[in-house]
Amino acid sequence: MSSPLRLLLPLLGLPAVALAAQDQASTKRLDTLTVTASRVPVPLRRIGSSVTVITAEDIAARQVVSLADALRSVPGLDVVRAGGLGQQTSVFLRGANSNQTLVLIDGVEANDPSNPGGLFDFANLTVDNIERIEILRGPQSTLYGGDAIGGVINIITQSGQAKPGADFSAEGGSFGSWRLTGNSSGRLDRFRYSVAASHLRSRGFSAANRRLDDNSEDDGYLNTTVSARLGWRALDNLDLDGVVRYNRTQTELDDCGGPHCDDPNERSYADQVFGRLQGKLDLFDGFWNQQLRLSYTLHDRNNQDDPDPISPFPPATNHFKGEKYKVDWQNTFRLIDMEALANDSLVIGITDERETASGDTTPHRSASTLAYYAENRLTWLERFITTVGVRQDDPNHTGDKVTWRATQAILIPETGTKLRGSYGKGFKAPSLFQLFAPASSFGPLGNPNLKPETSRGFEVGFDQSFWDERVLLGATYFRNDFRNLIDFDFSEGFSNIDDAESEGVETYLEFQPFDFLTLRGNYTYTRTEDETTNKRLLRRPSHKGSVDADLEVWENAHLHLNVLAVGSRDDMDFNVFPAERVNLASYAVVNLAARYRVNRNLEVFGRVDNLLDKRYQEVSGFGASSVAGYGGVQLSF
């Protein structure tokens, strides 16, 4: 057994030390609402799919800055970053490719149309103003269309429901890092608001691993983020809501990962905008709820590499711009409302979206998709919850695609048990780059005859609670089959040449022996296989687990311990020709965070990342943080 797992497994046994505390008050975490699984608010206990919810309190306890770091402990999810803050960051859900996960920010599709694979790069997304993050695993194309083969990550920002207040914080620490944040939110009669701004600056460390030869030049990072959400209850049955999030970043890059890869003059400049206007209308005493959403996404990237004596590459400038416009009209009908006997609701919607992409080396291209979707949710005797959904997508650049999905949850309240399962199909249309990229000096690139990638997946699992929900545990078996995967072939350009599969088991355990102590642990086993090569998929570990401990030392002091263990993975070493497959060693990272409230207005906090100074790589040839410390203060009014 690898060393990280030897470290992790004893920690997973910690909950056994305090079973005598079963008479304490319930945590009631299973009553947490999720909107992602069915597009309407539903308690987690009534969902037949695998959903993880990360709250603002969870984020504050860990003191993470990057949203990607907040996701690292989620079962079935792997985060891979090629260096420090601002470097390319990918997420893999249940073995699916990184461009097969749909990312939403307040319902706005955030995936980048100008990216070659249409993925969302998590490098520049911070945790500013976030209320919660919902991670829905498994094929979700029925409700969300393309890009949702692996699942959906939905980021939901603060809406301003409490008494108006404001927070300001300042922190600094390792790698010449400092960060300023400010936010205010609240409700005034029928008006609610939430606004936030932050500025982050870090000297960073070499993206190309400094332990490999002469990579000593630091790669810095700047991030300015502004977000706002405004709402107005215009009538008792009419609610209007608008949200916008903007961030501007500057990232220093290296040419590659490995020896002699430093580049002191290569930088990436990026602007991102995510905006949405929404209206909600209730009719006929709640029988019919309508939601009309207009959303806009912008990714504007400029890569610049000036001449320098270190890098052998010639100077270059590349500009990329991707935009997405979307209209979504969703209707929810409460067909049956018979309290404890039966409840039935039907969601019907239509979406129309248009995406565009352009760049210095690629012409302006666009694609449109019209889609219709429906899902019926039936609850019988408050024990049996069945959902069945279907969707038709009609892209103008590929053929029509029909997907469907069904879930089942069975509740046994006498024993605190939930049995659940789901089966669904997914698809991902080719990106604009894959379809239309012009030929290069190496040969063809774009292929207008590409077919959509498809998937089918199922899962079965259970959730069990004990001792008034102070102990929660569960397990899920999943399997996904991917077909017509798009890959690059030097003779034909992009082609549908790959098939793959993944299967595994996700487990979790949460225990609150006392009001002041909460322990959480999870472990995921994932087997992946490229059916063309019969080898496992790159950068996806077979074993991964984490342990989190939250301790209220006394009334005003809080400690959080996080241990993340990741097993060995395969990757490619591009510093040799031809590139070779390599194995990256397993690792375990320990992070510690603490907060102390001095009085009602002042709080001090600090954290140590990679407490044991573990040396490891997430991407072959690229660096990862050594032991690092940070501290700061927060003022609240």
Image (cartoon, rainbow, N blue to C red):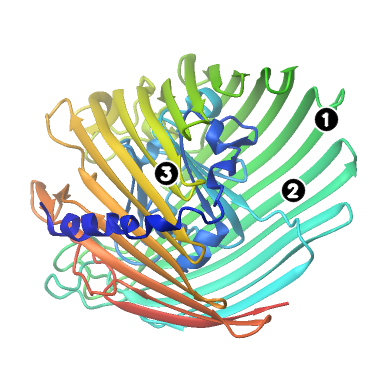
Residue corresponding to mark 2: 242
Q: Residue type at mark 1? A: Asp
Residue depicted at 56% across the width and 47% down the height: 28
Tell me whether circle 1 and circle 3 mark residues in contact (CB < 8 Å): no
What is the spatial separation of the Cα atoms under label 1 and label 3, in whole angstroms?
Answer: 39 Å
Give the SS element for disc 3: loop
Residue depicted at 56% across the width and 23% down the height: 383
**Disc 3: CA contacts within 10 A as few (<14), some (14-19) or many (>=20):** many
- In-front residue for pair 72/7: 7
- In-front residue for pair 334/617: 334
Comparing labels 3 and 2, the label whose residue is closer to the camera: 2
From the top left corner, tell me how far across and down residue 145 is, in percent: 51, 27
Q: Residue type at mark 2? A: Gly
From the top left corner, tell me how far across and down residue 354 is, in percent: 59, 32
Confirm whether residue 598 shows in the render. Answer: yes
Q: Residue type at mark 3? A: Asn
What is the spatial separation of the Cα atoms under label 3 and label 2, in whole angstroms?
Answer: 27 Å
Figure quadrant of residue 185: bottom right
Q: Which mark is residue 430?
A: none
From the top left corner, tell me how far across and down residue 314 is, in percent: 27, 63
Q: Residue furthest right?
A: 235
Residue corresponding to mark 3: 115
Figure quadrant of residue 272: bottom right
Residue corresponding to mark 1: 282
